[in-house]
Image: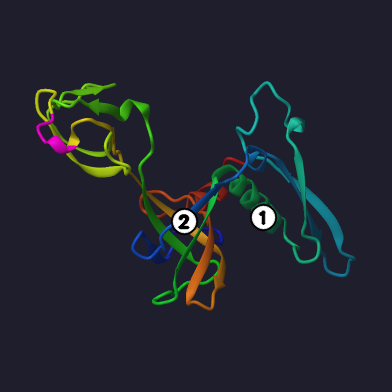
């Protein structure tokens, strides 16, 4: 499905990236600063042409509804100008450009970079990719200790069951990972006795990105920079949906 010239259907995912094809320790996330995501009023200049007349420069102003509160004046929004007079001769074209940049500012929150191997790579700048990553966010509520006799003390009482934990023993220099079995508040396995532990709580992210830059190295690896392209669960572009909405 499409609205005008904007495709509002699922985007075409060219390649999937996971821990299997992202080189270890190369994945980085950079979040945009708050000032880079501030709402603004777009003022777009374009060229209006009529037969047998000289071109005339015109401008339009576009804002997103809800950018300011009802008590505020739209004049309080910072203004950003876009000069399209060299190539834009349509008011509709100018409006769509303004809506696109305003939507980018509202929806895109971060960029990513990572390295991968050249083998099997089939993308270019502008390609849509899906990146699946797993993280283990730290929370003090997940911490606890196991005594020398196996008794568990934790912020939140642990019900009977198995828990994936990272743990550190007093007689060790390394943090280890394992599955800890708890029964009636006691861990029978002496491997976990005299230890401090933290429950591992994995968060899996599945995000769509658009490739901005590809850099090839002599070692046969490729550095990729991509920006977030928010999509719904069916890979339909939220950016396209906002641009074609009646919220402007």
Secondary structure predominantly adopted by residues drawn in magenta: loop
* As drawn, 126 above or below 207: below
How many neighbours does mark 2 have within 10 angstroms: few (below 14), some (14-19), or many (20 or more)? some
Mark carried by residue 212:
none
Q: Are marks 1 and 2 in contact (CB under 8 Å)?
A: no
Residue 97 badge: 1
- In the rendered structure, the answer to whether residue 34 lies left or right of residue 115 reads right
Q: Nearer the viewer, residue 179 or 63?
A: 179
Location of residue 215 (image quadrant): bottom right
User: In screen coordinates, is 129 left or right of 134?
Assistant: right
Q: Where, quadrant-wise, is the C terminus in this rendering?
A: top right
What residue is shown at x 76% (from left), y 48% (from top)? 60
Q: Magenta segment range?
A: 187-191
Residue named by callout 2: 27
List x then y, in percent, for residue 232. 40, 48
Residue name at image x 41 percent, y 60 percent: 24
Seen in the image, is 70 located left or right of residue 54? left
Residue 237 at what x, y percent from top left? 47, 53
- Determine the residue located farthest toward the right in the rendered image: 54
């Amino acid at each position: 499905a499409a609205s005008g010239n904007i495709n509002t259907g699922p985007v075409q995912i060219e390649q999937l990236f996971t821990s299997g094809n992202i080189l270890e320790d190369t994945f980085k996330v950079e979040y945009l600063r708050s000032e880079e995501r501030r709402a603004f009023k777009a003022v777009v200049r374009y060229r209006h042409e009529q037969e047998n007349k000289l071109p005339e420069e015109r401008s339009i102003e576009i804002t997103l509804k809800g950018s300011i509160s009802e008590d505020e004046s739209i004049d309080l929004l910072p203004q950003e100008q876009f000069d399209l007079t060299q190539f834009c001769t349509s008011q509709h074209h100018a409006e769509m450009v303004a809506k696109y940049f305003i939507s980018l500012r509202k929806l895109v929150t971060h960029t990513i970079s990572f390295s991968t191997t050249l083998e099997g790579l089939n993308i270019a700048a502008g390609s849509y990719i899906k990146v699946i990553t797993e993280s283990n966010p730290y929370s003090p509520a997940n911490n606890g200790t196991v005594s020398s006799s196996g008794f568990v003390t934790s912020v939140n009482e642990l019900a009977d069951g198995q828990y994936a934990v990272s743990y550190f023993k007093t007689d060790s220099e390394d943090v280890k990972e394992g599955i800890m079995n708890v029964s009636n508040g006691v861990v029978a396995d002496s491997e976990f006795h005299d230890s401090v532990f933290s429950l591992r709580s994995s968060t899996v992210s599945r995000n769509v990105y658009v490739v901005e830059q590809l850099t090839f190295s002599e070692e046969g690896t490729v550095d990729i920079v991509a920006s977030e392209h928010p999509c719904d669960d069916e890979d339909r572009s939220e950016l396209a949906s906002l641009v074609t909405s009646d919220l402007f």
